[in-house]
Image (cartoon, rainbow, N blue to C red):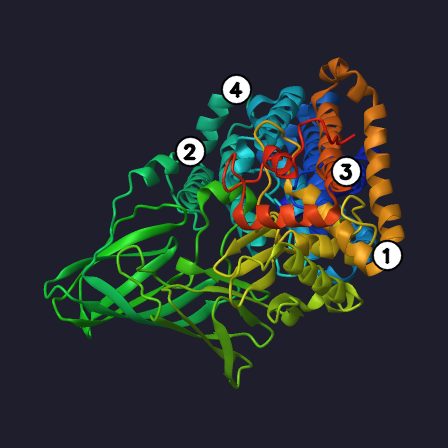
Amino acid sequence: MKGPSLYLVELKRLARNPLTYLLAGLSALAPMAGYGVLILTIGDSMSALYLANPMLAGGVLGAILFSLMVLLSLDQARRSGIRDVSDAIVNPMRMAAARLAAVWTVAGLTAAAVFLSYLPYTMWKLDIVFSLSDYTLSVCLLFLSGPAMGSLAASALWQLVRRLDVSLLGVLAALAVSLGGDCRRFFLTQWCVPLVPTLSDAFGSAIVWRTALYSRAVWLGLIGGAWLLSLLCVRQYGRGAIGSFLRHARRSALPILAAVLLCGGGLLWRWQPFSDHSPANWMEWMDQEEDRFNEALALEKTALQVGIESYLLGTMSGDAAFTIHNSSGQPQELYFELKCGYQVYSVSANGKAIPFEDLHNDMIASRELRCTLPAEEEIELQIRYGGMPKMWNEMESQLNADTISSQSVTMTSKALAPTVANCVAVPDEAEISLRIALKGDLVPVGTGTATLLGTSDDGTNSWLVEDTGTDRLFLYAGDFITTELAAGDGTSIDFCYSRKYRERLENGALDLMEKAIQYCTATYGPRSGDDGFQIIQTTAFNFGGFAVSGISGMGESYFSDENLADPDKGPGSAEILAHEIIHQWWGLGATLTDLEDPYWSDEGITVYTTYRLMCQVMGREYAHRYYVEKWENTMAQLSESFYQRHPEYLSRLPERYRNDVSANAAGANWYDGNALMIYRAAEQVGETALDAIWATLYQEGGTEMPPYITLGDFLGACGLEEGDVQRG
C-alpha cells in the first residue's frame, strides 16, 4: 500500500475511534487551564493573561494528550495481537510514518477548533488591544507546537523501546525538565512549547514570534532527526532494534537525512542570533574592566544615519560619523562599543580606511572594537555597521531586548550606533544628530528633539533627532501620541503613549494624571529636576518602569484592564493611573526599602499620596471611604487570617498554596499596611508637617542606607519610635 493511501486509512481509523475525540476534545479544553491554573508567563499584560497563558497551557497539556494518542495508535497492533500479520502486509516503517502524519492532522484540526472557539472570548477580553495576527501566531506557535512536538517525541521513543508506558513517562520527564526553572532561563531549551514571558498589548511581540519560530526549527531538526533514526529501529523480520537499524540503514537514505536534520538543529542552536555570550560571572569581569579613557581625545560632533533594512527580520544598517579632536599629535588607540549582533563593515579616518579589531568581549549585550586613530588634530571617524541587535543573555528569560518590528522600534544607546564615551571626553557642547527613515505610523520619541523632515513616495517618514552633551541617543518608535502634562511650576512633562489607549486616557484619566504631577511637584519637589523630562509608555517586555537620561518608562501593563481594576491601587482606573504617575516620584525617583523590614516599600507612600490627591480632587469624605476604610478593612481581615494567627501551620501547606498565602500577606502590607502606617503618623505629627518630612526625604534621601529611605529614616524624621504606629 502506498504512503498516501496508508495515511488516509489511518486517518479514517482515528476518525472512527472514540478515544480520538476524547483526547482531541480534552486538548481543545486545555487552554482553559491557562486562565488561572497553569501559569506559564510572568507578565501581566492583557495579551499575556488571556492569550499567551491559555495557548501555552493548551500546548503543554495537548502535548501529553497527543503523545498518548500517537502511542495508542502505534501500539494498537500489539494490543490486538496482529502485529506480526500487520508487519507482513505493510512495511512497519511506512505504517509508523502514516500514523504520525494522521495524528498530526488531528492536531491541526484541533488547533483550528481552538482558533474558532476561543476567538470571541479573546476578542472581548482584549478589547482595544486585540490583534488577529498575534492571536493566529499564538494558536499556531504556542498551542499547536505542543501536540506536534509531543507526538513526535513520543513516536520516536516508542520506536526505540516499543513500550507505551516507558515512552509516555519519557515524554512527561522531558516536559518536566523543560518547564523547570533552570531550563526556562533559555528560549532554546523549550522543546515542547516556546518560551513566552509575556506578550505586548500595544507594541508588538516580534521578539517572541522570532525566538518561537527559531526554537521550533531547532527542535524540529533535533527531534525530527532522532525520529528518523528511531524509525530505522522499527522491528522487522524478527530482528531486534540494533539488527533492524543495521538492515534498514543499508538500503535507505534516512540516515543521511537524519544526520542533516540533527546537524542542522545543532548548528542553529550554536549560531542562534538572539542572545549574546556575556560571561556568567559578569559582575566580576566588570570589576576587573580596564580604564579605556584617553585624555588626548575629545568628541566634538556625532552624525548618525540609520536605516531599517527589514522590519520582518528586525535588521538595520547605519553610518556613524564622529568628529574627534586629537590634542596629542600622536596616533591614539580608540575603543568603541557596539551592540552584540551588529557587524562592523568598515572604519575610516579622514576618508582613509583604517584597520580595526573586534575584541569579542561580550558584556551586557555590547562588545568593544579597537582601532588606531592617526596623529592628525581633527579626525573624521566613520563607522559603517549593521545587523540585528542581540539581547543580554541574563535577560533571556524575559526576552528583554532592543527590537525592530513593523509595530515598534526600540534602539537605545549602543543598539542605535557605536559609542565612544568610555574612551573619549564628551563635553556639554558636543552635538549629536540622527537621521532615520521610519514607517509612516511610527513616531520617534526618546532623548533629544525629533523633527519630521518629510515623507517619501513609499510612505516612510524621514526624521531628524538632535541632542547635545552626549555620544548616544535612546530611540523609541511606535504609534505614539504626545501630551504635555503641566507640572504646576511653569514646566511640563511630555507623556507619550500608544494611540490604542487614546479613548481610554482622554476620558478623564489624563486630567487626573496631570493633577497627580502637579500635586507631587508642589508637595515633594520637581521630578529629579531634569529639563525636557518625558514619561514614555514602553513595551511589556521591560517589566515595569525605568529611568534613564531624562526619560521615565511606564510599562504598558500599567494601562491594562487588570491593572486598572486593582483595588489595592485605587477604586477607579483614572486613580490607578494617577497612582502609577506618583511612582515617578516614589519608586523611580526616590526608593523606600529596609533590609530589616521586607514590607517597607514604595507602594505605601504611593498609595498614601494617591489618597491625599483624592482628598483635594474628590473631597475628604470620598477619600476616607475608598482609601482609609479599605486599608483598615484589609488589615483587619489579614489579622483575622488563620495563618496570620497561627504561622506555624503555614509550613504544612503545599508550596504553591504557601506561596499564595505569603503573597497575599505581603501585598496587604505593601499597599494597605504601609499606607495606613503613614496615615497614622500624619494623625500624630500633622499632615502639613508630614508633607514637609516626605519632601525632605525625597530630595535628600535617607541616612541609614543612603540613598534609600528606610523605615527607621521615616520614623526618626517624624520623631516616632518603632511601635508608635502600626500597619494593623
Q: Nearer the viewer, residue 279 or 54?
A: 279
Residue 591 place in picture, x, y as percent: 58, 44
Q: How many marks?
A: 4
Q: Secondary structure at mark 1?
A: loop
Q: Which residue is mark 1?
A: 619
Q: Is residue 96 visible?
A: no
Residue 250, numbered circle: 2
Q: Compute the Cα span from label 4 to label 1.
A: 84 Å
Q: Give the residue number, with chain letter if any, for mark 4.
A: 240
For the point 51% across and 85% down, the residue is 456
Q: Are marks 2 and 1 in contact (CB under 8 Å)?
A: no
Q: CA distance from mark 3 to mark 2?
A: 84 Å
The answer to whether the residue labelled 4 contacts the one labelled 1, judged by CB atoms less than 8 Å apart, is: no
- Find the distance from the CA under tag 2 to the CA under tag 4: 16 Å
Return the residue nearer the eye: 42 or 97: 42
Q: Judge the density around disc 4: few (<14), some (14-19), many (≥20) Cα neighbours within 10 Å.
A: few
Q: Could you say whether the residue bearing mark 4 is in a helix, strand or loop?
A: loop
Question: Which residue sits at x=83%, y=46%?
Answer: 627
**Of the two numbered discs 3 and 2 in the rendering, the one whose residue sits closer to the viewer:** 3
Q: Is residue 526 above or below residue 609?
A: below
User: Which label's residue is closer to the chain start, 4 or 1?
Assistant: 4
Residue 213 in percent (x, y) is at 55, 50
